Image (cartoon, grey):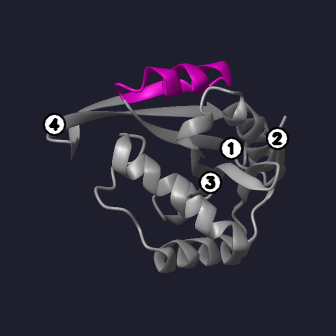
């Protein structure tokens, strides 16, 4: 089983490689071009400054996956809701790393007093939809043809998990 721990700044190059692999070869991200190390370092610094978790799964000494969540829509009324992401390196997908990352990510959301976790998933990504269902996420919206990648229109499904507690912060 992998070790799951908070990410460090020196993990960012591995996180970048995993993310850019998804950008180039999947619809897990609707980014069309790889992101730069500079932009990913800025992303990491913003997560850290905002108190948002970034977790990594490590096998041996290699980062093989990461998970995070952060602000949903950037409005004060959504302060108890966060949008999450889980990415696994292509060559080790399907081996339980997603589960190893998602369980502590949900626990951290609860610890922080969040009320809802949201995820945006490509509608054709049946594996990710099933994965989220196992954790209690339910589909709440199907948005046809809102994205375009690899020369085709993509449908986006939003899933959400209502956490215990009311998450009221104000």
- Percent across and percent down for residue 130 are 55, 19
Q: Badge 4: few (under 14), some or many (20 or more) residues near its Cα, within 10 Å?
A: few
Image quadrant holding the C terminus, namely bottom right
Earlier-in-chain disc, 2 versus 1? 2
In the rendered structure, are the residues bearing label 3 and label 2 in contact, judged by CB atoms less than 8 Å apart? no
Earlier-in-chain disc, 4 versus 3? 3
Which residue position holds label 1?
115
Q: Nearer the viewer, mark 3 or mark 2?
A: 2
Which residue position holds label 3?
69
Q: Nearer the viewer, residue 35 or 129?
A: 35
Question: Dot 2 lies on which element?
Answer: loop
Label 4 vs label 1: CA separation? 35 Å
- Percent across and percent down for residue 96 are 71, 28
Residue visible at 69% across and 27% down in the picture = 95
Image quadrant holding the N terminus, namely top right
Q: Nearer the viewer, residue 90 or 80?
A: 90
Earlier-in-chain disc, 4 versus 1? 1
Q: Badge 1: few (under 14), some or many (20 or more) residues near its Cα, within 10 Å?
A: many
Residue visible at 45% across and 50% down in the picture = 21
Which residue position holds label 4?
152
Q: Is residue 33 magenta?
A: no
Which residue position holds label 2?
2
Q: Nearer the viewer, mark 1 or mark 3?
A: 3
Span colored in magenta? 123-141
Earlier-in-chain disc, 1 versus 3? 3
Q: Is residue 132 magenta?
A: yes
Residue visible at 68% across and 78% down in the picture = 49
Earlier-in-chain disc, 3 versus 2? 2
Residue visible at 65% across and 33% down in the picture = 162
- Would residue 146 appear left or right of 14 to someone viewing this image? left
């Amino acid at each position: 089983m992998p070790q799951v721990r908070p990410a460090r700044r020196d993990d960012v190059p591995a996180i970048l490689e995993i993310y850019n692999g998804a950008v180039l070869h999947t619809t897990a991200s609707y980014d069309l071009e790889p992101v730069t190390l500079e932009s990913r370092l800025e992303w990491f610094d913003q997560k850290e400054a905002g108190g948002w978790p970034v977790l990594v799964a490590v096998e041996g000494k290699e980062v093989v996956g990461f998970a995070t969540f952060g602000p949903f829509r950037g409005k004060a009324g959504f302060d108890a809701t966060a949008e999450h992401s889980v990415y696994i390196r292509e060559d080790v997908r399907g081996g339980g790393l997603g589960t190893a990352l998602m369980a502590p990510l949900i626990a951290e959301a609860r610890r922080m007093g969040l009320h809802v976790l949201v995820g945006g998933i490509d509608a054709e990504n049946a594996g990710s939809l099933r994965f989220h269902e196992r954790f209690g996420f339910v589909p709440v919206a199907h948005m046809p043809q809102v994205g375009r990648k690899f020369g085709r229109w993509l449908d986006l499904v939003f899933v959400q998990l209502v956490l215990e507690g009311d998450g009221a912060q104000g």
